[in-house]
Amino acid sequence: MVSDSVSPGGDLAGLRAFALRVGCYAGHRYPQRPEWVELAGERIDVAAVESEWREEEKLGFLVTLRDGRRLLLYYVPNEDLWSGALQE
């Protein structure tokens, strides 16, 4: 049986619905720091990583894009999956 759960209360299918292409700096680990995201076919640089955290089976990043928008990013290592949602 395959489970779509990535953490208690989490949903891998939901994360897949918001999948994004993300380019990262990878020094001593991957991903160390998101450097750009692709939104609507446009590559936008990350101006700042405001915060980062680790959850049970995924990594989270709150970033500010070069155009001023803020984006909540998640990376699921076991799936090599990035997802994100713009923040108000």
Image (tube, rainbow, N blue to C red):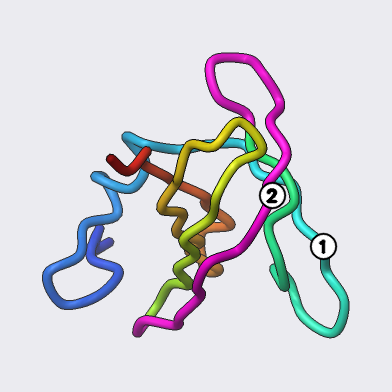
Residue 34: percent from left, percent from top = 68, 57
Q: Who is closer to the viewer here, 56 or 5?
A: 56
14 up-or-down from 12: above or below: above
Crowding near pointer 2: few (<14 within 10 Å), some, many (20+)?
some
Going by the numbered disc 1, the residue's amino acid type is Tyr
Residue at figure coordinates x 42%, y 45% from the top left: 84
Among all residues in the image, which is located at the extreme left?
Answer: 9
Crowding near pointer 1: few (<14 within 10 Å), some, many (20+)?
few
Magenta residues? 38-56
The reply, left or right, for residue 71 in relation to residue 85 is: right
Residue 32: percent from left, percent from top = 72, 73
Residue at which label 1 appears: 25
38 up-or-down from 13: above or below: above
Residue 4 colored in magenta in the image: no
Residue at figure coordinates x 41%, y 53% from the top left: 72
Residue at figure coordinates x 45%, y 59% from the top left: 74
Q: Who is closer to the viewer here, 75 or 80?
A: 75
The reply, left or right, for residue 34 in relation to residue 8 is: right
Cα separation between marks 1 and 2: 13 Å
Question: Regarding mark 2 in the picture, which secondary structure is present there?
Answer: strand
Residue at which label 2 appears: 47
